[in-house]
Amino acid sequence: MSSTSKMTIGRAVGDAMMEMAPRRDPHLGRGGMALLKSVPLFSQLSRRDLHRLAAHAEEVRYGANRTIVSRGARGDSFFVIGDGEAVVTRGTRKIGTLKQGDFFGEMALLDGKPRSATVVAKTPMRTIRITRTGFNKALDANPTIARGIMAELASRVRRLESPPSD
């Protein structure tokens, strides 16, 4: 086999492996910050607290057909979709589609319980991910982040408890 053929095969294998494995980038740009700010759970955070939280986030890319989270697996990360589309299933039943700006795994940040659904990338995806460990470090170092999140959670509970308006 010629060295050119070996290089072509090696490049093809390397490209295929990059499609299979998530690629991480620990630096969030303005787009990543805007995505985090768009998440209702973080909507009460000041710009400073959002930057502090973003210090514990990373950009992760997934190839099409890649499973991002699996139902029943321990919940240890939260994701915001920057680009791409994903399918959410519970067993064999499709329960939804997620696209740019959507998020999933927020309960995992709070309780670390097993995932309630599987999320698979339908197209190549770019996500912002915060692990539960990073999230807890951000809260420990910056209690105002916890207060902002608690305010949003309280607001959600109040909305659920209030009677529907006519």
Image (spheres, rainbow, N blue to C red):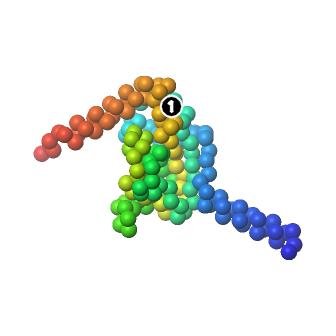
Dot 1: what SS? helix
Q: At which x and y percent is residue 64? A: 54, 63
Residue displayed at 39% across by 57% down: 117
- Position of 94 relative to 107 (above/below): below
- Position of 1 relative to 71 (above/below): below
10 Å crowding of disc 1: few (<14), some (14-19), many (20+): few
Foreground residue among 54 and 119: 119
Residue displayed at 49% across by 63% down: 122
Residue 101 makes an appearance in the image: no
Residue displayed at 52% across by 64% down: 65
Count of number-bearing discs: 1
Q: At which x and y percent is residue 9? A: 76, 69
Task: Tell me the quarter of the image containing the C terminus.
Answer: top left
Query: Where, by quadrant of the figure, is residue 16 drawn?
Result: bottom right
Task: Tell me the quarter of the image containing the N terminus.
Answer: bottom right
Residue 116 makes an appearance in the image: yes
Q: At which x and y percent is residue 57? A: 54, 39
Residue position for label 1: 137
Kind of residue at badge 1 = Lys
Foreground residue among 28 and 23: 23
Residue displayed at 28% across by 35% down: 155
- Position of 14 relative to 79 (above/below): below
Q: Residue furthest bottom?
A: 1
Q: At which x and y percent is residue 106? A: 40, 44
Q: Residue furthest right?
A: 2
Query: Where, by quadrant of the figure, is residue 21 drawn?
Result: bottom right
